[in-house]
Amino acid sequence: MTTPPFLQKGDTVGIVSTARKISKEELQPFLQLLESWGLQAKLGISIEAEAHQFAGDDTLRAKDFQNMMDDASVKAIWCARGGYGTVRIIDRLNFSEFKKNPKWIVGYSDVTVLHSHVHNFNIESVHANMAMEIDSKTEATRTSVRDALFGKDFSIEYASEGKLNRNGTTSGMLVGGNLSLLYSLCGSSSAINTAGKILFIEDLDEYLYHIDRMMQNLKRNGYFENLKGLIVGGMSDMRDNTKPFGKSAEEIISETVSEYTFPLCFHLPAGHIQDNRALILGRMVDLKVEPKIVKLKFSNPKSQIPNRKS
């Protein structure tokens, strides 16, 4: 995998919205955060653009992302807001310059489309909080994404709840993101190959039977066949029908993968939750699921850093 050049003080971060509309005013706390890190912000044309719920029409949003990919002065592209819309522009984008001169793509949820797509170019990306509302999340949310982008070592440790976890130690490349998006990408050029890797999933505001349907689909597509480990983040604000499905989202996931032996853990602090830690997708990690603690350690990529190009 290629590790994009880490950020340095003075670098420029491009801010775009590939999905829902957003105002510059809503981004003020984030812009102040970037400034406190010594970074410059470049707002894309999608910021304050509007086409119904979208941040401008598909043509505008694609042009904005393309401009940021092709602008050599932009060292990272941070998505401002999620929702829905990234899949509508992915096939309009030309990644030839990006593949020659990769840069960090930052975001989560709907940005899973971009993470999965660039993973197939063997380029790392950062699954982390959107620009919007990052100021209202935990300090660990902000610190972890800053450490990831600036190339500092970091890991995640949290108390194991144990009930549904499957203990074990494993290593592999971390992939994944939002379950609904991974499900929607099946069969497309943006679908990921999970063989020999560790899969992370999270989701928000889904009916429980939808979780079951999506997990069954991933299973039928072979996502769990040669998996090294499964990490489940926030499964937040799940819904149920009048006639209950009978299992929680976590129980559905556990049941779906019960025939496999890879380590499994729940409640990693990442996803649509208050403590949304950064994850470097495409990075090798060591995962330890123990009775009392779960440890996720990211490998040191310094030997992989490409030469910085101005």
Image (spheres, helix red, strand yellow):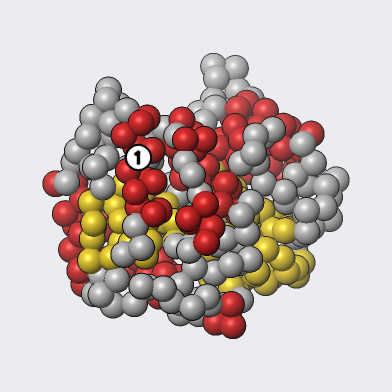
Q: 78 or 181, which is in the foreground? A: 78
- Give the left or right position of residue 289, taking residue 85 as reference: right
Residue at image position (63%, 66%) is: 1
**Looking at the figure, which quarter contains the C terminus?**
bottom left
Identify the residue shown where x is 18% and y is 63%. 32
**Vertical relation: 58 (above or below) 28:** above
Check the image and name the residue furthest to the left: 25
Q: Residue at x 57, y 60 (%)?
A: 123
Question: Does residue 286 appear in the picture of this structure?
Answer: yes
Q: Please name the residue shown 56% across and 52% down the image.
A: 118
Of residues 3 and 92, the one nearer the viewer is 92
Decide if residue 54 is on the left or right side of residue 233.
left
In terms of image quadrants, where is residue 11? bottom left
In the image, residue 240 lies at what x, y percent? 54, 25
Local packing at callout 1 (Cα closer than 10 Å; few below 14, some 14-19, many 20+) is: some
- In percent of width and height, residue 65 lies at 37, 45
* Callout count: 1
Res. 28 image quadrant: bottom left
Mark 1: amino acid: Lys
For label 1, the residue is: 63
Q: Nearer the viewer, residue 238 or 148?
A: 148
Name the side, left or right, on which 16 lies relative to 180. left
Residue 256 lies, in percent from the top left, at: 75, 39
Q: Is residue 160 visible?
A: no
Rendering coords of residue 250 (x, y %): 63, 43
**Badge 1 element:** helix
20 above or below 245?
Answer: below
